[in-house]
């Protein structure tokens, strides 16, 4: 389903230096397969996701989704492709405040069908995600775990073939994080969706079919025992200055804790 | 935290939020500027009357005044001077005149005086030595006025038109601002007393005597003067003119006060919109400070410092902008009131006006900055959960709408029962509007969402969801538009209704004659200057002339009002503008007034003296006359009020056979243009009389009405402009701040065009809801203002519902603001989707 062929991304840095964010990554993810991708900060995880999602052009190599080289897509086609073929899951803060669970979940579907049909379409999935009783609740009335499940519903609402998840359990505690990962695995298998989950969460390994580590822009098999400490123990840098920035970063650091 | 540290913290934070702070400064400055300019504009006229009165009277504290332009005998002067307790008495003869030079012409208040006036020390004549040209018959003019009409050199001739005479006077002196201070901006002409008497054709007559009593002799002198006055002259203080002017300018002052209130509110909402963008940073700062152990007091001090800096900079900018605005846009035009008062056009800026503008600006800054404080300080400092619903009102929209309905009903009660309380009524209406707005916005969003459900497409859905979640920000932007459109529609509507009413009144009062001859000059537009009607027989003999009547009219101080007395010739039909009657039977009233001994009074004037139809009263004319009230009317376009009597009654009450105009009725079918030509030929050059057809006279009066109401026109135009800029800036900033969220939507697969359309859809929806509510309330405000103008000031208002104008304003403001937003919206929609992952 997803095929990365010798993907390279270099950024120009200060002076004549080049940052080698991704260095010859090749990967295949089959339909229904979930791949967990670990990596320390700055290892290139986000860059890799951006290239898969057609938001960043590779320096070299190819991204092939469903047999189609995404480099051949125009911007409009790429948008349409992301709408129908890709699902994105980020942290739960992406929900619209003051908007009901079901309306938040139908956000993508509304682009291609009427509201009533969209609600009809999404309702079973929300029930499947345990939100059957919370359909009309506003997002701020939901727990963090419930909010993340709404994000999963939104991501899967258009029946995508590929799911990209960026720290999907980042703002959840261990138990809720486990529940979310379990649901993700089940749904991806049921719907034959290929999933790439970028995470710091060590328990993600238990729910993924394959676990990989991205280190210095290169992919390698994940070997937690060889790391000396779990991926989640990777500390975020402490902010150097500015009270505002410190709070931003403190939230992330808190969120990364298991 | 020490003050130095508070300042340091402010400085380092400013780097990250200079744009938002700048917007807030501009917002508050706009409000301060509008408030300041309107106050200057309002205070300047009142101040100019005061300054001019003081500039003439100097140390005088009492005056003996004539009740008519004919004045009183000069022989009274030695009697006054001989009174025990009188230290100094200076004679003055005043008359309205038209001064012309090579470059133009201007109405002036001619002041004839002798050297005794200089002894009173008034600024106007302190430096002008009246003696040297005392026997020459020359004129002194303020330098700006001399420049306007184009006379500059000593001895250059100034053409003066006074009371139907046209004469020339050499320029003796140009009075500069260094000599007479702010009076240099006044439209006055100073001439020796004997020359004034010669020019006006009133030898040995005076308009008033200014008296400086000896210390402690004030009451005694007043009492003695009353004896001399014998009920035929007025004895008054020096502030007499000022008090009469305040009544005459009441309508203008009220409109300015309303404008000041609306502009201050628009400015505050602008500022509030801008400050809302800095709330997330302030919220984060407060949370950090609380977490680090700082007390609520310290946090408050930090925010108070923010408000102080914001307020001070914004106020300074606002005062500068307001000053410019008062010079170039809201300049006081005294033309209308100068027909009855000596008014200058200098600007008056006193400490009170500056203090008011500063207080308004500082209050706006304090409220805008400190509003989030209460909520934030109440929160647990360790509560790190993201706030998804910040800014949502505590009171539900339903309850707010109910409170709004209560305000609306109270405003309606004011409309029906106490129209003079128009300003509180307007304030209540604005409060109702703001309270109803959240409910209206929510309903509009629900309705749009319901309609959108029938169609495929994410744009309207996302737009309504985004607006629904925007909370206080969206409301503040909609409120800005609503208040601005409210003000604009109410003022514009009332302005139109008043203008229509004034035009109708002018048409009706001029309906009796076909051609009017009156002393020339724009100072005499109300035909209040008397002259000897020596040409009546000659006019009657002209071809096409059916009848020549003598119209008499003048200004009469009655109580606290300088009323306009109109006395049409009895043989002309109609005598009364019966369309202006508010009480009384038209036919009977007309018959009674024609017969003499009866008068039609403005309702407000009658009410002030407790008069009803049929009741008798004494008209305080030069020869006080007992009259009865035949009917009550509107003020016929003259704010202080009007009295209509027959010309013969007027002649008796004024003890004068002089006329103010010839009214000529033409033979049926005779062309007015030809008749006017014949009349001009018969009069010859230099008659000093202007020949006008009824249509020309009505048009001139309409033009004057429009000029008098020009400030309302400026106000109605300024508010929407301010609102468009405010809303475009606020929406633009809101959209720009939403770029990360737009990036997330892009990540979900929404294309650039869809996002841009969503932004535009949101803008149109938000602005149109705000503006629609504003327009609806504005139409109601128009009725409130109309009723206040009609009932309180008695203006001849023609009620209307200017729905199309309101709709036009709505569309114009919404379309303009959206058009301005299109570019930042497009740029915001171009946000790279990668931003969502990099955040």
Image: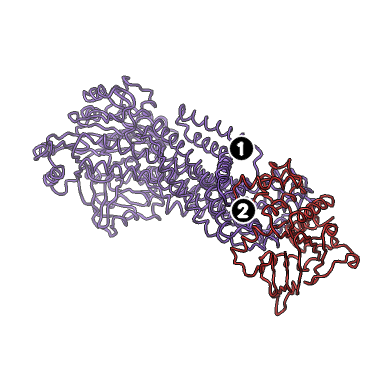
Chain colours: A red, B purple
Residue A85, picture quadrant: bottom right
**Residue B743 vs residue A113, the one in the foreground:** A113
Marks 2 and 1 share the same chain? yes
Is disc 2 surrounded by few (<14), some (14 to 19) or many (20+) residues within 10 Å? Answer: many
Spot occupied by residue B272 in the image (x, y as percentages of width and height): 59, 48
Q: Earlier in the sequence, mark 2 or mark 1?
A: 2
Spot occupied by residue B690 in the image (x, y as percentages of width and height): 20, 45
Task: Answer with left or right where residue A83 lies relative to residue B556.
Answer: right
Host chain of mark 2: B
Q: What residue sits right under mark 2 in the picture?
A: B310
Q: Quadrant of the C terminus of chain B?
A: bottom right
Residue A69, picture quadrant: bottom right
**Residue A75 drawn above or below residue B437:** below
**Residue A48 vs residue A92, the one in the foreground:** A48
Inspect this view and state whether residue B682 appears: yes
Q: What residue sits right under mark 1 in the picture?
A: B397
């Amino acid at each position: 389903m997803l095929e990365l062929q010798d993907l390279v991304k270099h950024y120009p840095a200060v002076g004549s230096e080049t940052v080698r964010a991704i260095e010859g990554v090749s990967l295949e993810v089959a339909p229904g397969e979930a791949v967990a991708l670990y990596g320390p900060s700055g290892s290139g995880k986000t860059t890799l996701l951006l290239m898969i999602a057609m938001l960043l052009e590779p320096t070299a190599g190819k991204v092939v989704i469903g047999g189609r080289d995404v480099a051949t897509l125009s911007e409009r086609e790429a948008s349409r492709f992301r709408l129908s073929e890709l699902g994105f899951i980020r942290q739960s803060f992406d929900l619209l405040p003051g908007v009901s669970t079901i309306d938040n979940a139908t956000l993508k579907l509304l682009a291609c069908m009427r509201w009533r049909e969209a609600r009809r379409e999404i309702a079973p999935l929300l029930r499947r995600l345990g939100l059957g009783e919370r359909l009309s609740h506003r997002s701020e009335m939901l727990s963090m775990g419930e909010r993340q499940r709404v994000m999963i519903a939104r991501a899967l609402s258009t029946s995508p073939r590929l799911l990209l998840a960026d720290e999907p359990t980042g703002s959840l505690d261990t138990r809720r994080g486990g529940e979310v990962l379990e649901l993700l695995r089940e749904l991806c298998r049921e719907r034959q969706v290929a999933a790439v989950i970028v995470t710091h969460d060590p328990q993600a390994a238990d729910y993924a079919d394959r676990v990989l580590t991205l280190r210095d822009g290169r992919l390698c098999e994940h070997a937690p025992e060889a790391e000396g400490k779990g991926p989640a123990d990777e500390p975020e840098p402490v902010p150097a200055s500015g009270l505002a920035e410190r709070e931003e970063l403190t939230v992330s650091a808190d969120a990364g804790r298991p | 935290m020490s003050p130095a540290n508070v300042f340091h913290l402010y400085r380092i934070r400013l780097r990250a939020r200079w744009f938002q702070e700048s917007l807030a400064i501009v917002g508050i400055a706009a409000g301060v500027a509008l408030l300041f300019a309107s106050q200057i504009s309002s205070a300047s006229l009142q101040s100019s009357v005061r300054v001019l009165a003081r500039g003439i009277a100097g140390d005088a504290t009492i005056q003996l005044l004539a009740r008519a332009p004919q004045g009183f005998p000069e022989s009274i002067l030695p009697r006054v001077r001989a009174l025990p307790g009188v230290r100094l008495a200076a004679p003055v003869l005043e008359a309205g005149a038209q001064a012309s030079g090579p470059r133009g012409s201007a109405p002036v208040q001619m002041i004839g005086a002798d050297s005794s006036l200089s002894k009173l020390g008034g600024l106007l004549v302190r430096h002008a030595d009246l003696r040297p040209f005392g026997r020459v018959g020359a004129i002194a003019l303020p330098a700006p006025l001399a420049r306007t009409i184009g006379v500059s050199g000593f001895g250059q001739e100034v053409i003066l038109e006074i009371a139907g005479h046209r004469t020339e006077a050499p320029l003796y002196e140009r009075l500069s601002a260094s000599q007479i201070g702010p009076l240099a901006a006044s439209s006055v002409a100073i001439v020796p007393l004997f020359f004034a008497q010669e020019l006006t054709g009133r030898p040995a007559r005076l308009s008033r005597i200014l008296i400086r009593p000896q210390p402690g002799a004030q009451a005694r002198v007043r009492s003695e003067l009353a004896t001399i006055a014998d009920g035929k002259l007025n004895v008054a203080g020096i502030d007499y003119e000022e008090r009469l002017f305040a009544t005459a300018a009441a309508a203008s002052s009220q409109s300015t006060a309303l404008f000041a209130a609306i502009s201050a509110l628009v400015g505050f909402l602008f500022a509030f919109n801008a400050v809302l963008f800095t709330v997330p940073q302030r919220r984060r700062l407060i949370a950090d400070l609380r977490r680090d152990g700082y007390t609520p007091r310290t946090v408050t001090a930090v925010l108070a410092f923010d408000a102080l800096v914001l307020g001070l900079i914004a106020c300074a900018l606002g005062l500068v902008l307001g000053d410019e605005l008062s010079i170039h846009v809201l300049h006081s035009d005294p033309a209308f009131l100068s027909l009855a008062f000596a008014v200058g056009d200098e600007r008056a800026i006193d400490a009170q006006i500056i203090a008011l503008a500063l207080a308004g600006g500082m209050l706006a800054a304090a409220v805008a900055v400190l509003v989030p404080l209460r909520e934030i300080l109440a929160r647990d400092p360790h509560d790190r959960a993201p706030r998804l619903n910040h800014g949502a009102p505590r009171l539900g929209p339903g309850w707010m709408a109910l409170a709004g309905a209560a305000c609306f009903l109270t405003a309606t009660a004011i409309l029906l029962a106490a129209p003079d309380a128009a300003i509180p009524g307007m304030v209540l209406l604005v409060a109702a509007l703001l309270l109803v707005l959240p409910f209206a916005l929510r309903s509009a969003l629900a309705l749009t969402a319901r309609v959108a459900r029938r169609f495929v497409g994410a744009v309207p859905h996302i737009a309504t969801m985004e607006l629904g979640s925007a909370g206080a920000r969206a409301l503040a932007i909609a409120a800005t538009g609503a208040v601005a459109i409210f003000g604009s529609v109410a003022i514009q509507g009332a302005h139109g209704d008043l203008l229509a009413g004034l035009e109708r009144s002018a048409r009706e009062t001029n309906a009796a004659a076909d051609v009017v001859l009156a002393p020339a000059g724009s100072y005499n537009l109300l035909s209040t200057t008397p002259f000897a009607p020596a040409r009546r027989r000659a006019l009657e003999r002209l071809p096409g002339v059916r009848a020549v009547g003598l119209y008499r009219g003048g200004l009469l101080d009655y109580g606290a009002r300088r009323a306009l007395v109109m006395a049409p010739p009895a043989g002309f039909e109609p005598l009364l503008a019966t369309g202006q009657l508010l009480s009384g039977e038209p036919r009977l009233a007309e018959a009674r007034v024609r017969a003499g001994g009866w008068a039609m009074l403005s309702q407000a004037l009658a009410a002030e003296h407790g008069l009803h139809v049929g009741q008798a009263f004494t008209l305080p004319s030069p020869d006080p006359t007992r009259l009865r009230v035949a009917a009550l009317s509107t003020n016929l376009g003259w704010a202080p009020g009007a009295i209509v009597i027959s010309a013969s009654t007027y002649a008796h009450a004024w003890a004068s056979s002089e006329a103010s105009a010839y009214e000529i009725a033409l033979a049926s079918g005779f062309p007015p243009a030809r008749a006017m030509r014949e009349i001009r030929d018969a009069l010859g050059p230099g008659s000093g009389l202007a020949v006008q057809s009824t249509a020309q006279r009505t048009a001139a009066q309409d033009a004057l009405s429009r000029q008098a109401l020009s400030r309302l026109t400026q106000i109605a135009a300024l508010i929407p402009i301010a609102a468009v800029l405010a809303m475009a800036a606020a929406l633009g900033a809101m959209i720009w701040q939403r770029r990360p969220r737009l990036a997330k939507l892009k990540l979900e697969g929404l294309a650039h065009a869809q996002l841009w359309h969503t932004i535009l859809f949101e803008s149109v929806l938000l602005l149109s809801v705000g503006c629609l509510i504003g327009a609806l309330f504005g139409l109601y405000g128009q009725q409130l203002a109309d009723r206040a103008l009609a009932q309180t000031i008695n203006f001849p208002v023609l009620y209307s519902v200017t729905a199309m104008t309101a709709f036009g304003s709505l569309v114009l403001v919404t379309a303009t603001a959206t058009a301005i937003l299109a570019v930042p919206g497009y740029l915001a929609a171009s946000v790279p989707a990668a931003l969502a992952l990099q955040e």
